[in-house]
């Protein structure tokens, strides 16, 4: 907790020093020192991913910054950034076939299937921003059912991706609820723990599959509290900054 507060203080002091160089509400870039520019870049990158919880889909061992024993997730999806609770035709087209300009060749799914998809998910769905990468590519579905065409994220996890036709049929037949499935627009590529921006945590299947729709406690806080130790301390510090949350 001490190091977290110290780092926060150093960042705040650094940003205030940069802001003090402003003239007329503007900062001349050439008046900012190299180390201050690096601070601004790191701060911007951290703001983009702050309090994100990502589910790793693929990981490459021993390649992060060349560090022995380290790892980098070559593909992950952010699971706590919901954007829609129902499905429009436009969103369905994007999830199933991707944007027109990003697609080579004909769409994978025809109009008839898109209509069946909407029959299953138009009224109720859970759609998330999975990350800033591949946002114009076809989306991804994540669920906990072993269905034809679905691929297990890792052996024994019982967390699956894909199998879209089988997912749609399972929802239409009442075998699955629409909220048993998460849909993701975009991914996060090359998520590294080398710079301490991300922290790897092994968590339970129910936590990884939990829908982030109207939760009484944000998933980021729940994950950190479950992890315990220094991560739980960071969660408590951040709780104090939220007037809309009441810590238990």
Image: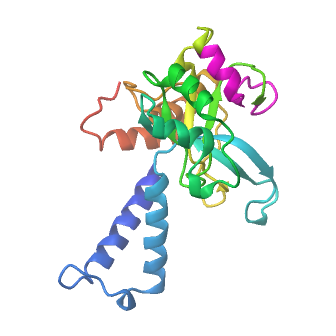
Q: How is the image coloured?
A: rainbow
Quadrant for the C terminus, please. Answer: top left
Identified at 75% across, 19% down, the residue is 146
Locate residue 181 relative to residue 90 in the image: left or right: right
Identified at 31% across, 41% down, the residue is 240
Residue 83 shown in magenta = no
Locate residue 140 relative to residue 232 in the image: left or right: right
Give the camera-side residue of 194 and 237. 194
Identified at 57% across, 53% down, the residue is 100
Q: Is residue 196 visible?
A: no
Q: Is residue 61 above or below residue 78?
A: below
Identified at 40% across, 38% down, the residue is 236
| Count of picture labels | 0
Q: Of all residues shown, which one is farthest toward the top?
A: 174
Quarter of image, res 36:
bottom left
Residue 164 shown in magenta = yes
What segment is highlighted magenta in the picture? 152-171
Q: Position of residue 156 (x, y in %)?
A: 79, 24
Q: Position of residue 25 (x, y in %)?
A: 20, 78
Give the camera-side residue of 114 and 12. 114
Quarter of image, res 66:
bottom right
Give the camera-side residue of 98 and 208. 98
Q: Position of residue 239 (x, y in %)?
A: 35, 38
Q: Position of residue 88 (x, y in %)?
A: 44, 33
């Amino acid at each position: 907790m001490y190091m977290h507060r110290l780092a926060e203080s150093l960042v705040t002091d650094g940003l205030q020093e940069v802001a003090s160089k402003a003239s007329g509400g503007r900062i001349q870039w050439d008046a900012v020192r190299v180390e201050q520019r690096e601070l601004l870049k790191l701060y911007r990158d951290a703001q983009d991913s702050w309090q994100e919880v990502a589910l790793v889909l693929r990981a490459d061992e021993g390649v992060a910054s060349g560090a022995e024993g380290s790892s980098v997730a070559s593909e992950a999806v952010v699971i706590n950034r919901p954007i829609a609770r129902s499905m429009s035709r436009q969103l369905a087209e994007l999830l199933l076939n991707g944007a027109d300009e990003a697609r080579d060749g004909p769409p994978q799914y025809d109009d008839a299937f898109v209509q069946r998809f909407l029959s299953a998910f138009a009224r109720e769905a859970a759609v998330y921003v999975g990350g800033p990468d591949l946002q114009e590519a076809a989306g991804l579905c994540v669920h906990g059912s072993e269905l034809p065409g679905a691929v297990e994220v890792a052996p024994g996890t019982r967390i699956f991706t894909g199998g879209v036709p089988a997912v749609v049929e399972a929802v239409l037949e009442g075998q699955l609820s629409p909220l048993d499935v998460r849909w993701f627009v975009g991914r996060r590529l090359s998520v590294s723990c080398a710079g301490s921006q991300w922290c790897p945590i092994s968590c339970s299947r129910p936590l990884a599959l939990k829908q982030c729709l109207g939760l009484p406690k944000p998933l980021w806080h729940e994950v950190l509290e479950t992890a315990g130790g220094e991560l739980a301390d960071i969660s408590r510090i951040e709780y104090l900054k939220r007037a809309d949350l009441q810590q238990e």
